[in-house]
Image (tube, rainbow, N blue to C red):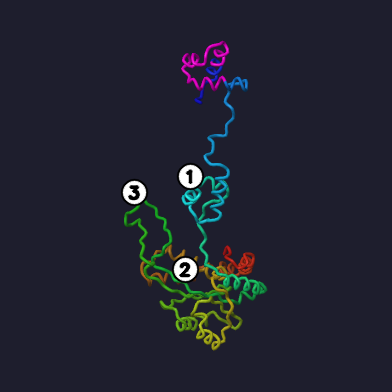
Amino acid sequence: MTDIPDAIRHLIVDKVNQGESQRKVSLQLNVCLSTVNEIVKRYRSTGSTDNRCRSGRPKKTTERERRFLCQLSKKEPFMSPRQLLRDAELANQISLRSARRILSASGLVGRIAARKPLLNKKHIRQRNSFCKDYLQMTASAWGNVIFTDEMRIELYGSRRAYVRRKVGMRFHNEYVCKTVKFGGRSLLLWGAIKEDGSRILLRCPKIMNSAAYQSVLNEGLPDIYSRHSVLMHDGAPCHRSMSTKLYLERKKICYISDWPSQSPDLNIIENMWAVLKRNVSQRFPHTIEELWEVAKKEWYAIDNAYIRKLYASIPRRLNAVRKMHGKQSKY
């Protein structure tokens, strides 16, 4: 019903009460007949011509349909709202925006999914057992562990880049982020850190086999390894090969032999790699040699306090994995 002024509403009621027909009142006051009928009906039932309180436009979906849409999203969390509408057979009933609003009202908000390694039952069991055993280690004992790892850094990374430009110049050459297939040229780096801030960064061969890995250890470990140190490396084939095990025994290097596979959340050097990649990307190197020089400079520029903070987080990481029963943690 259109919005009719209060004076006209009262006049309609008065004329009808005086015996005039609703059609005649409609013609006299230039008001739709159905509107006159609705005003008179409301007055006779409520004693007032005022509009009643309304909740807004009626919902196009029932409570059951909304609940089904949310249940479908919980069952398939990676399904898009458009796919959910199609599977719930609601595509012709409500809009995509309405679907998103229904999901958000139920606490199902769209977010970027965290990227974590795929874990099978064996990985989960190993991680859970490792964390249970090593929770007994004291903070001073962890301070003797040298965390090591390899990382490939690309000359043309895939990170999103922000640029400040004028409107309409998005595709001008100076404002475009250049990309190369497979990241272009890259460097394989080996790094090691210790709680006191000591660290090593070495440039590795393109292919890291057992012989190359042993050569890297032979070059890098003497500067950081001491009598009380313990080497930590992950389950890469070149780390766990029989040749490397014999090398470590021959060199009398103590190492953690039961480090669980697929566990970057327990290896604190992964955080160092993330900082290094971010800092290097902000320096915009143009050649592979410039990339190496920038990487070395940024690696040794990381604050020692940050490394100590990473070591202090180890017990919390172990506890987090235990609470998740060996599955992915927030680290």
- Residue type at mark 1 is Arg
Q: Looking at the rendered structure, which numbered label has been put on residue 318?
A: none
Q: Which residue is depicted at the point 55% across and 50% down?
A: 70
Identify the residue position indicated by label 3 in the image.
Answer: 168
| SS at mark 1 in the image | helix
Q: In the image, residue 300 lies at what x, y percent? A: 49, 71
Q: Nearer the viewer, mark 2 or mark 3?
A: 3
Q: Looking at the rendered structure, which numbered label has been put on residue 97?
A: 1
Instruction: Examine the structure image and report whether residue 187 is included in the region drawn in magenta.
Output: no
| SS at mark 3 in the image | loop
- Residue type at mark 3 is Gly
Of the image marks 1 and 3, the number of the one nearer the N terminus: 1
Q: Nearer the viewer, mark 1 or mark 3?
A: 1
Tell me the magenta residue range.
12-40
Q: Looking at the rendered structure, which numbered label has been put on residue 298?
A: 2
Q: Nearer the viewer, mark 1 or mark 2?
A: 1
Q: In the image, residue 160 lies at what x, y percent? A: 43, 59
Front residue of 45/54: it is: 45
Image quarter hosting the C terminus: bottom right
